[in-house]
Image (spheres, rainbow, N blue to C red):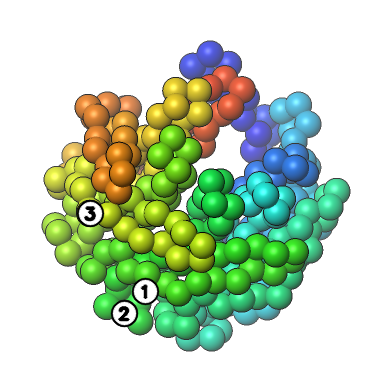
Amino acid sequence: VAGTVSGTTITFGTPVVYNSANTSHNTATYDENAQKTLVHYTDAGVTSKGYARVGTVSGTSISLGTATLFHDGWTEYQASSYDSDAQKIVIAYEDDQSSDVGQAVVATISGTSVSFGSATEFESGAVSYIKAGYDATNQKTIIVYKDEGNSNYGTAVVGTVSGTSISFGTPVVFASANTQDMGIAHDPVSTKMLIVYKDSGNSSYGTGIVGTVSGDSISFGTEVVYLDRNSQGGHALFHTAANQLYVIFNDGNNANKIRMKPATISGTAVSYGTMVYVGSNNASIMLTTVYDSDTKQIVLAYRDGAAG
């Protein structure tokens, strides 16, 4: 569904079905060069394979191109990111058909169609909770995930797009604990990446860590807690007009209400400002965020548990 922001309100056009079957792992990423949105998902109607469709917004409506297969097998934990240098979208996912390993493909949009390069493995063990972000400073795609083959540790890997393929460096652990609900964002001010996550090894606290990309590798500073109680659905987002990085999350010990904090990176460390109470709704953990560059605002979408 297409949303139009006016002032501090958002209105919506008519929802359009993109898959007429049980659908999961739904993700959408905007291609700035093609000026299209790529929607990719798992279609349980065809043995849970991975498909993608190109969306074109016109006014308050959205139309969709033909569904295109990008993974011919059970596909889970999808994430994607736009590479502005290569002008491609990278889709990362768990390949359930091959012992849950982590794979990625490069998507190229042409008109209302999308094509894909060959899949590349970024993790040979089982993965879950995948997220992807783009480092515009170093022109790299960063994939973060839970490495189930290595004690469920939070892990990151650097990807380089060339044509229709992607290659990866060596995965690096950023959290030596059971890690999930991850988010990632590039901070152009410090030229670093901020990764946020729920640290189940530390009472499920909301935690952030700074990543520095160099070539095809990434190194990390010290973990810093942003919520010293159960945190869920963490996101990191850069507000371009305010020139400010934000952490947005659900307060798990307070009815999953939405909270946010400004985050500032200095060197390899991150610090946080005063917490803002976004709303009183029981939001559950189904939270997503996007920056609206036209109105210079952050839009939050969530499931309102209190309203059913």
Q: Which mark is residue 150?
A: 2
- The amino acid type of the residue labelled 2 equals Asn
Q: Could you say where residue 67 lies in the image, as x and y percent from the top left?
A: 76, 61
**For residue 159, what is the image quadrant?**
bottom right
- 239 is higher (above) or lower (below) than 73: above
Q: Which mark is residue 222?
A: 3
Separation (CA) of disc 2 from disc 1: 5 Å
Q: Secondary structure at mark 3?
A: loop
Which is closer to the viewer, label 3 or label 1?
Answer: 3
Separation (CA) of disc 3 from disc 1: 20 Å
Q: Which mark is residue 147?
A: 1
Q: Could you say where residue 66 lies in the image, as x and y percent from the top left?
A: 81, 57
Separation (CA) of disc 2 from disc 3: 20 Å
Q: Could you say where residue 292 lies in the image, as x and y percent from the top left?
A: 56, 28
Taking the image as shown, residue 226 lies to the left or right of residue 111, namely left
Instruction: Please tell me which of labels 3 and 1 falls first in the chain.
Output: 1
Residue at image x 36%, y 74%? Answer: 147
Instruction: Farthest residue to the top: give it.
Output: 7
Residue at image x 22%, y 27%? Answer: 274
Locate the N terminus and report the quarter of the image it occupies.
Answer: top right
Taking the image as shown, residue 41 lies to the left or right of residue 127, namely right
Q: Which mark is residue 38?
A: none
Which is closer to the viewer, label 2 or label 3?
Answer: 3
- 280 is higher (above) or lower (below) than 31: above
